[in-house]
Image (cartoon, rainbow, N blue to C red):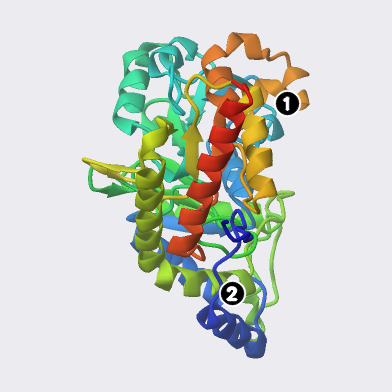
Amino acid sequence: MTEQRRVSFSPPDITQAEIDEVVDTLKSGWITTGPKTKEFERELAAFTGADRVAAFSSATAALECALRALGVGPGDEVITSAYTYTASCSVICHVGATPVLCDVAPDSYEMDYDALASLVTERTRAVIPVDIAGRMVDYGRLFAALESVGSRWTPATDLQRAIGRVAVLADGAHSLGAVQDGRPSGSVADFTAFSFHAVKNLTTAEGGALAWRAGAFDSDELYNQFMLMSLHGQTKDALSKTRAGAWEYDVAYPGWKCNMTDIQAALGLAQLRRYPALLARRRELVGRYENGLADLGVDVLQHYGEGFASSGHLMLVRLPGKSAAFRSALIERLADAGVSANVHYKPLPMLTAYHDLGFDIDDFPNARAQFENEVTLPLHTLLLDDDVDYVVGAFHRAWDALEAEGVR
């Protein structure tokens, strides 16, 4: 008889290194945005190959500030995937623009690039692709799709003109550390927003960052613009006001409050130093899952292949030929065995907020089909090999029992 154990879905991997870094910050007397936040930004830029990085309180804030920097607002359209978490789309609503949802391709988590091209109008200002589970989307096909309809695009701001086409603002909440054709996430899209939420590969408890590629922007000007946005539009932050007599400041416009603190950045710095080893461990765990599930004929998202490597953030598994009822029953059986599983994601048109905006899931059949038999298994760096084997065993037992009961 298999011994019962508890396998959590995605707890944070915190060691003494993170604790020591945070304690050092607490003892320093500087706990809000300060030297460690700036150091974290610099180290993230070096890690991602981005021209520069600005830290924020969340990836959502980073996405919204990027849209605002682009001048996106009422009367504009922004395209994103129907198969994503709400944050990819809610920021479009926050700036007053109109969200346009694109279905995924059949049997894919990525937008249908042909359909994407057909959705571009003269009002389209940006596209928000989603690097789901840590695997970067096919940016080559994405850029080609936008270039194929370039004649429809008209820039409305200097920043849009500098990009020279519809802006690509990647939702890279999952993809820190992913690589495509030798280029890391953060250096490919015009902008890339990263998340450091508690369940992410690298965590600052809450937090996010915005990276941008080299070549199209005045980085100093752009960085200063993001700092203004994140601190009420105030022209001098707390760190710069610490110089003797340097109290004077102005407020350029009524901005927002979404800065990262040094306590968060301290946690992030320690995590970033461990991150290459964490990525390697995730790759080992993904391989162990793939081997353990191979005999069931399930469809596991390919995280690693020729020319690309995922960050290994989520273990997405689809159950071909199985119904939503089978999927839900499987998750319940896994829970009975002590295994926490999840689903990523319920398509946006199935959520009240987006249904109320006029979206209908019937218009997104591929997203619905992708969702109905998807299950996400635990994947984190506190897992032991035995834990993965236990999850795989529980998955097999649940699968066999449901089939024996006639659940399809």
Q: Is residue 318 above or below residue 227?
A: above
Closer to us: 71 or 80: 80
Q: Which residue is mark 1?
A: 351
- What amino acid is at disc 2? Gly
Between the C-alphas of marks 1 and 2, the distance is: 39 Å
Secondary structure of the residue carrying tag 2 is loop
> Residue at coordinates 42% horizontally, 50% vertically from top-left?
312
Q: Residue 86's x, y, as percent?
A: 66, 35
Tag of residue 331: none
Whether residue 400 appears in this view of the structure is yes
Q: Nearer the viewer, mark 1 or mark 2?
A: 1
The image position of residue 394, as x and y in percent, is 55, 47
Who comes first in sequence, dot 1 or dot 2? 2
Residue visible at 71% across and 50% down in the picture = 255
Dot 2: few (<14), some (14–19), or many (≥20) neighbours within 10 Å? Answer: some
Which residue is pictured at 70% across the width and 22% down the height? 350
Amino acid type shown at disc 1: Leu
Element under label 1?
loop
Name the residue nearer the viewer: 268 or 79. Answer: 268
State which quarter of the image contains the N terminus. bottom right
Frontmost residue, 299 versus 131: 299
- In the rendered structure, the answer to whether residue 13 lies left or right of residue 97 reads left
Residue labelled with disc 2? 34
Q: Position of residue 380 (x, y in %)?
A: 51, 58
Is 338 placed above or below 139 here?
below
Please state which of residues 106 and 402 is positioned toward the viewer in this rendering: 402
Q: Is residue 332 above or below residue 176?
A: above
